[in-house]
Amino acid sequence: MPEFETHEHDVLVIGAGGAGLRAAIEASAAGVSVGVVTKSLLGKAHTVMAEGGIAAAMANVDDRDNWKVHFADTMRGGQYLNNPRMAQLHAQEAPARVKELEAWGALFDRTSDGRILQRNFGGHKYPRLAHVGDRTGLEMIRTLQDHGIHRGIDVHMECTIITLLKDGERVAGAFGYDRERGRFKLFHAKAVVLATGGIGRAYQITSNSWEYTGDGHSLAFHAGADLLDMEFVQFHPTGMVWPPSVRGVLVTEAVRGEGGVLLNKDGRRFLFDDIPPLYKNQTADNPEEGWRYTQGDKDARRPPELLTRDHVARCIVREIREGRGSPHGGIFLDISWIKEKLPNSAEHIKRKLPSMYHQFKQLADIDITKEPMEIGPTTHYMMGGVRVDGDTQMSSVPGLFAAGECAAGLHGANRLGGNSLSDLLVFGKRAGENAARFAKEHGATQINSAEAQAAARRAVEPFERASGEGPYQVQSDLQTMMQTHVGIVRREEELQKALEEIAKLRARAGQASVGGNREYNPGWHTALDLENLLTVSEAIARSALDRKESRGAHFRDDFPSKDEAFAKANTLVRKGLDGAMQVTRVPAQEMPAELKQIIEEMK
């Protein structure tokens, strides 16, 4: 085995999306040496696909908004399974993070008097999303990249981490390989920040990019860290289902925020049939105008298209299952109807939703200013992830931190739109800051070379199997199985079936073979991704089986109601001493009295 290319850093950040870049910037500002490992090229992170905006209670459009309202909205959306400390910090610090981004050069849309413009979004009481048209994530990455690139941060592009290395109980670094040449790389660090994003590629239909194979979740689990709430997978209600060229591609919630309506094949706005009890007695005089959040508060009226994502997704599935769907198994999202109210509606849509207009015009020959889109739910976001401390973002493994989508806590059972981007900024900063502090306060770690050698040997095993099947077929079968048995609507027998299938797929993955050599070999990359995909798939299925109720993004057809036994319990996934996955329930973090009072006031 050749000598490994070795890199030394005080803080190693795995992932270069919004959370990873913000963590790297903060750690570097603290005066420690920082390395960033990214699976793709710098600037190509999945964060660029976040379109709607950054949720922050800046009160630029409605001066009644403040952090307390944002906190209450986030907790209600998460069905109160959120970590209340994280929800508090997020609501309090998001405005400062947005202003910081602006100071670093982000060009936000503006109000008539020059302030950052904010738009409505599902589950938010007031217009709260600071945005750059429908390209907010792209502007965030551009800004963070431009700001961070001059800080002396070492960036290791097109590099995949396959295992974390430990010194006793403490994390000591990571081991991976260069995707281009296949050369192994050893990263020695005093602290590690996981910012690897989500798990969408475990499913057949997803808005997620190819990198989202659950790497951070799996790395943390195998290093001994706890995972939390893995049953809560958000299916965004509006992903394209037709034509095939854009299947799964996300249609941002901003389309509905700007006036888009959901229609079944009969042209009915079916969401008016199922407004939740919370709003039942607060319906506007003219229901077609929407409902009210607060009685007597006519300005807070919202259309039903901006109900929480889990609710909208289930209503869409119901319409499709009951035969009222579109010709290709979806329903219709129509923003072209606003021409009835706006004479210059086409220009308005192009200005407000430039990416949506150009993307679907070029890729699908659909002009959204003239015709509806055919959409359906698509796997979008993982609320569950690495269990972290609310203040520091450190996991149960000393020196191992997590931020963004691969960390759990902020969103509870369901994430509100726009909270993801502010999550990246608020907790990316906190993770970087505390990782740097940990690196300064703790001495150097020792790398066990035998551990790295063993990881390298396991990584090349697919080349040594002469007759195994290809890894692509295993991955495809896993995605189909997860879509079928662990999707939006779940049942016990289907979840049990999923676990049986995962065991079979794991055996097949252990025999998968690849040809050629390590240079430019995507088959090999897929073979190595299988371990992560199987780990997160098992964690999702086991957690979903354990939660025998419906709450937030988790819907059990055999247990359609909420159960008080689960109301204040989070699902914990941990690696047992025998290596098997263990699932237990732990009490949700208790909300302090002052935060309870805020919730009551907001009701």
Image (cartoon, rainbow, N blue to C red):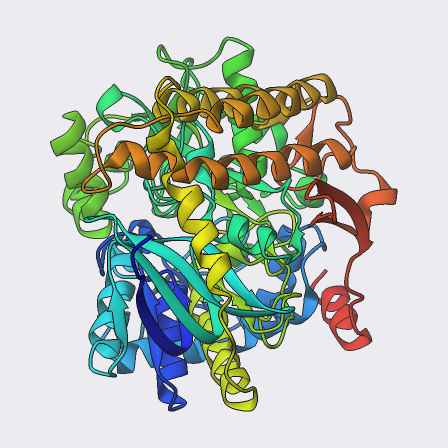
Say which residue appears at 66% left-offset and 48% top-offset.
229
Quadrant (top left/top right/bottom left/bottom right) for the C terminus: bottom right
Q: Position of residue 46 (x, y in %)?
A: 32, 51
Closest to the observer, 473 or 26 = 473
Where on the picture, by quarter, is residue 132? bottom left
The outermost residue toward the right is: 565
> Quick check: 421 above or below 245?
below
Relative to 286, 587 lies left or right:
right
Q: Is residue 334 above or below residue 409?
A: above
Q: Is residue 305 visible?
A: no
- Between 381 and 5, the residue placed more toward the observer is 5
Q: Position of residue 501 (x, y in %)?
A: 59, 20
What residue lies at 36% left-to-right and 76% top-to-bottom?
8
User: Residue 519: image x %, image y %?
Assistant: 19, 42
Extreme residue in the front direction: 1
The x, y position of residue 579, in whole percent, is 68, 44
Q: Is residue 338 above or below residue 332?
A: below
The answer to whether residue 312 is above or below residue 386 is above
Report the number of numbered marks.
Answer: 0
Residue 91 seen in this snapshot: yes
Q: Residue at x 25, y 56 (%)?
A: 133
Q: In this orientation, which residue lies closer to the viewer: 332 or 218?
A: 218
For residue 321, what is the image quadrant?
top right
